[in-house]
Amino acid sequence: MTASTRLDNVRTLVLTGASRGIGHATVKKFGAQGWRIITVSRQSFSALCPWPSGGENHVQLDLADPVDLGRGIEMIRKRVPGGRLDALVNNAAISPKGEGGGRLGAIDTPFDLWRQVFNVNFFAPVALARGLMDELAAARGCVVNVTSIAGSRVHPFAGSAYATSKAALAALTREMAHDFGPRGIRVNAIAPGEIDTAILSPGTEKIVENQIPMRRLGTPDEVADVIHFLCEQGASYVSGAEIQINGGQHV
């Protein structure tokens, strides 16, 4: 068996937002299961990231820039072995804050900021899926969109632009499941709640105490486990779903 044949037999994941938190845990989870991971980020690949061959499998692009996104999709396609892509995980998102880290509501969020948030959180996921549709279809692959509990309720820290972009992404997941399904592509979403990452806002402990039945934060590994499940054979008939990962916070 040649090196190229071995590469063609390896399942491939394209993941946006891999450098920290949920994305970082997802890379480690899939890497441990033998997947090849192509990461996408606005930043260049960091030598601090522990996964092998990360530099050569990293695509640097600005998801907020439609022109750069088109260029980036072509770069990703060149890195997909055998023209087959098993999974696309749209994890990257931005959640801008006001002065002192305050919540930006519908009244005080500048319109150019709304546009930037929607470009990254909403338009980039559908653009990537459409741009990589042939590769996903060839592998009968799947798409996982990362939404948020903020997409279904007003959150004390997540701003209006972020929340509405995540609500739109949840609706988009259903539409994509309908449209991509005949091509053999499954599309699902996960909606994390309060996850123990470096970007937690002050005051989260009150949410844990008063709103989460399990009375604890979730971990990035727990989220990565659900993403991995949705990309594996055990979820082969799951499409159009949005899985809540929030310790019961949504009930």
Image: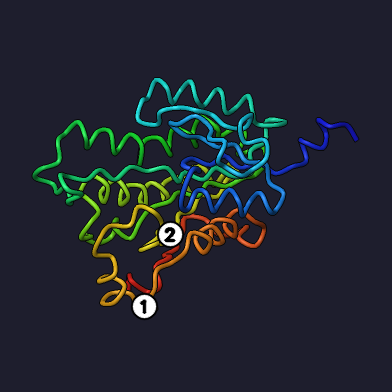
Q: Quadrant of the C terminus?
A: bottom left
Q: Which labelled disc corresponds to residue 215?
A: 1
x then y, percent, for residue 171: 35, 50
What residue appears at the point 28 percent right and 33 percent down from the top-left corner?
Answer: 116
Q: Is residue 50 above or below residue 153?
A: above
What residue appears at the point 45 percent right and 54 percent down from the top-left corner?
Answer: 189
Please tell me which residue lies in front, 146 or 233. Answer: 146
Q: Which labelled disc corresponds to residue 242?
A: 2
x then y, percent, for residue 68: 42, 22
What residue appears at the point 27 percent right and 47 percent down from the top-left corner?
Answer: 162
Q: Amino acid at mark 2?
A: Glu
- In the picture as drawn, the residue positioned furthest to the right comes out as 1
x then y, percent, for residue 180: 52, 43
**Left or right of residue 182: residue 139:** right
Q: Amino acid at mark 1?
A: Arg
- In the picture as drawn, the residue positioned furthest to the left comes out as 107
x then y, percent, for residue 147: 38, 53
The tag earlier along the polypeptide, 2 or 1, is: 1
What residue appears at the point 52 percent right and 55 percent down from the top-left corner?
Answer: 239
Q: Quadrant of the N terminus?
A: top right
Color scheme of the displayed model: rainbow
**Left or right of residue 128: residue 148:** left
SS label for mark 2: strand
Of badges 2 and 1, nearer the viewer stands 1
Q: Quadrant of residue 29?
A: bottom right
